[in-house]
Image (cartoon, grey):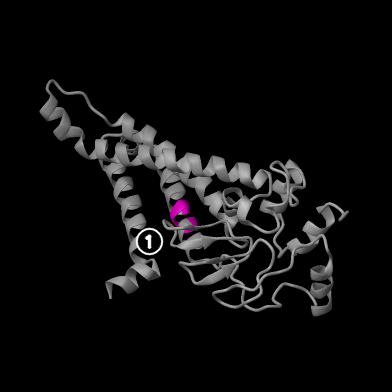
Amino acid sequence: MVQNLFRSGFLVRLVHTVLTWVVTLVLFLHNTDLRRCEERGELLAPALFFLLVLLSVLLYFAVSLMDPGFVLTDTAGQGSHEETESMIAQPSTPRLRRCGFCLLQQPMRAKHCQTCKRCVRRFDHHCPWMENCVGERNHRWFVVYLLVQLLVLLWALRIALSGVSPAAAWEPWLRANGLLLAALALLGVFSGVVLLLLGSHLYLVSTNCTTWEFMSRHRISYLKNCGDEENPFDRGLFCNLWDFFCVCRTVMWEQVYQKHAPDPA
């Protein structure tokens, strides 16, 4: 029973939700800027903060429960059989491989996730905090979630600091500010982690690269023969960002690779 709960991601999502709302409650109940605004009847800032927290939770569940781009069949999103065969036949394009676990033909940039037991298109990584893969369909929403979450955490840090009150001795100061200090510690750790994640993902997105490709470049068939600075999927900063955030479609990366691959000698 417990193993099934862990596998389903229920406990991970429950912990995330409980931590989020407990910290939010602490910030509202202590003598922070939020509480002082409420007492003065200035409800705009508290309402905006609450809505931002709610948005971050909704985005978390959207990314966590969304199909990341599971490969369902050999031909799904691949185009016609003749078109696929012609791409495979090109000497400049590596052959599409068949997954050794689910036995489906993997599109380029797809990878089998051992945790989800599925192949994922444009696989980036499996996120244990989301208990879901990050791939073609939910990667942009994952980045948007990180951005919103970072705004919430930084604002919450400022609110928590505003509520720390002085005291004449150490023990009464600790009793008065214990919960706020615990909230500050959590907020500080998560702010650092989210900032690093957001920065790394924005860099990878700007170069049209995934975490898996960046970390395992030397083992990936379509990248290991490219130069260290060469990326066959890179279309430039503006086009990469536009395609990632604004274009909602399944990309046939074999065709993109074929256009940018060097001609065979």
Where residue 148 appears, as percent x and y from the top left, is 50, 46
Which element type, helix, strand or loop, lies under badge 1?
A: helix
Is the residue 260 above or below the residue 169 in the image?
below
How many dots with numbers? 1
Q: Residue lying furthest top in this view?
A: 168
Instruction: Specify whether 214 is left or right of 92.
Output: left
Residue 30 lies within the magenta run = no
Q: Amino acid at mark 1?
A: Arg
Examine the image and state in which quarter residue 180 appears.
top left
Instruction: Specify whether 150 is left or right of 231.
Output: left
Q: Residue at x 83, y 63 (%)?
A: 91
Q: Which quadrant: the N terminus?
A: bottom left
* In front of the other: 86 or 245: 86
Is the residue 165 above or below the residue 9 in the image?
above
Where residue 80 appears, as percent x and y from the top left, is 80, 77
* In front of the other: 120 or 21: 120
Examine the image and state in which quarter residue 164 appears.
top left
Where residue 77 appears, as percent x and y from the top left, is 72, 72
Q: Main secondary structure of the magenta part?
A: helix
Q: Is residue 41 visible?
A: no
Q: Which residue is mark 1?
A: 13
Q: Is residue 197 visible?
A: yes
* In front of the other: 167 or 147: 147
Is the residue 172 above or below the residue 146 in the image?
above
Where residue 59 appears, as percent x and y from the top left, is 50, 56
Q: Residue at x 23, y 27 (%)?
A: 165
Instruction: Identify the magenta region.
Output: 55-59
